[in-house]
Image (cartoon, grey):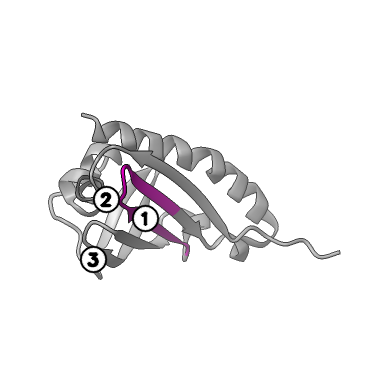
Amino acid sequence: MTTRLPRTLICEVTTRATPAAVYALLATGRGLSRWWSASLEEDLRVGAVVELPLGDATLRIRVERLEASSLVVWRCLGGVAEWHRSSIRFELESGELTTLRLEHRGFERLGDIAEEKHESYSSGWPTVIQAFVDKLGE
């Protein structure tokens, strides 16, 4: 029997905020500091390595892609073992409402604990994204 391991966690929310406002919370130091509890001075740039607090650890990410008001992609470099080499993609779609789609990829490489971690983050990411959306209303 072959068990298919989860590869990607997807979380999607909509907001009345503009794509530019959502992007600013993802791609600027000031924006990230508002919802990730980090204190970042500079805006993100492709290739930059950023440290973000995550519980008792510090998550190290490299910014892979930035497309104004539409896309932010991070590669996890370390700090949280199960996140190492995973990627987090924030994609924005505009319409009557702005849709933010988060894709956290890379769980299959965790082997036996992949399903457990996927389930854990499946409940954690929606909480984080809701806090993010709440900041858009402030």
Horizontal and vertical percent for residue 7?
59, 61
The residue sitting at 53% across, 56% down in the picture is 82
Is the C-beta separation of discs 2 and 1 under 8 Å?
yes
Q: Earlier in the sequence, mark 1 or mark 3?
A: 3
Left or right? Give the position of 87 relative to 120: left
Give amino acid for label 2. Answer: Leu
Of the 4 image quadrants, the one containing the N terminus is bottom right
> Which of labels 2 and 3 is toward the front?
2
In the picture provided, is 5 more to the left or to the right than 104? Answer: right
- Residue 48: image tag: 3
Q: Which residue is mark 1?
A: 90
What type is the residue that disc 3 sits on? Answer: Ala
In this view, the residue in front, 72 or 39, is: 72
Disc 1 element: strand
Alpha carbon distance from label 2 to label 1: 8 Å
| Residue 52 falls within the magenta-colored stretch | no
What segment is highlighted magenta in the picture? 86-102
Who's the residue at 23% across and 56% down the image? 69
State the SS at label 3: loop
Residue found at the very far front of the displayed protein: 96
* Residue 2 place in picture, x, y as percent: 81, 65
What residue is pinned by disc 2?
26
**Location of residue 123 in the rendering, given as x and y in whole percent from the top left corner:** 54, 38
Residue 29 drawn above or below residue 134: below
Q: Residues within 10 Å of mark 1 (few under 14, many from 20)?
A: many
Which residue is at 62% across, 63% downward?
108
User: Could you tell me which quadrant the C terminus lies in?
Assistant: top left
Lower sequence index among marks 2 and 3: 2
Give the secondary structure at mark 2. helix
Q: Is residue 80 visible?
A: yes
Tell me what residue is drawn at x 47 percent, y 66 percent: 85
Q: Which amino acid, mark 1?
A: Phe
